[in-house]
């Protein structure tokens, strides 16, 4: 999953949402997700031991509307966790190899209120 990196932290992203004739630019706060709907895949990239500090960043990969629901939407997220390395530069790969600080990569869908 090699997608382009973002220049701003994806912890609070925005997306364009259209409902009928109404269109609004809304903030997405992934902390509001209330249900993990599916886990597409994940990798434990490296071991983690006591005493390490875990940092993480998340990226919105896709969004979906749920048929018959106007109060709930779905987001596909990638969360990457690192050990002893802040995530201001979104570490994942170093060339074709995994970044040495990455310990976990998880691809999943969450539901959140609109």
Image (cartoon, grey):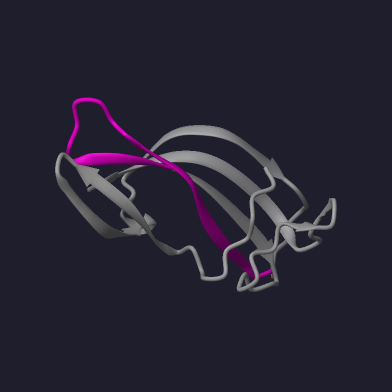
Q: Position of residue 104 (x, y in %)?
A: 67, 50
On the image, which quarter does residue 20 sit in? top left
Taking the spot 22% from the left edge, 48% from the top edge, the residue there is 114
Q: Residue at x 19, y 26 (%)?
A: 68
Left or right: 85, with 26 as reference point: right
Q: Nearer the viewer, residue 47 or 13?
A: 13
Which is more toward the observer, 68 or 33?
68
User: Which residue lies at the image location 84% right of the left edge and 57% below the top edge?
Assistant: 95
Q: Main secondary structure of the magenta part?
A: strand
Locate residue 32, reporting x and y percent.
Answer: 31, 54
Where is 77 relative to 103, above or below?
Answer: above
Q: Is residue 39 above or below residue 30?
A: above
Q: Is 8 covered by the magenta stretch?
A: no
Q: What residue lies at 64% left-to-right and 50% top-to-bottom? A: 3
Nearest to the observer: residue 48 or residue 16? 16
Q: Residue furthest front?
A: 21
Residue 64: name its quadrant.
top left
Q: Is residue 72 one of those drawn in magenta?
A: yes
On the image, the x and y values in percent for residue 42 come to 64, 39
**In the rendered view of the protein, which quadrant contains the N terminus?**
top right
Between 63 and 24, the residue placed more toward the observer is: 24
Q: Is residue 99 left or right of residue 36?
A: right
The residue stretch that appears in magenta: 52-75
* Mark count: 0
């Amino acid at each position: 999953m090699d997608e382009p990196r973002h220049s701003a932290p994806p912890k609070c992203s925005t997306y364009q949402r259209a409902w009928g004739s109404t269109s609004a630019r809304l903030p997405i706060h992934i902390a509001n997700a209330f249900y993990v709907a599916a886990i597409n895949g994940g990798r434990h990239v490296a071991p983690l031991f006591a005493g390490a500090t875990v940092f993480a960043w998340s990226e919105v990969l896709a969004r979906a509307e749920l048929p018959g629901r106007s109060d709930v939407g779905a987001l596909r997220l990638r969360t990457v966790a690192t050990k002893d390395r802040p995530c201001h530069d979104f570490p994942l790969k170093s060339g074709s190899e995994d970044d040495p600080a990455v310990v976990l990569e998880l691809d999943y869908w969450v539901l959140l209120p609109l």
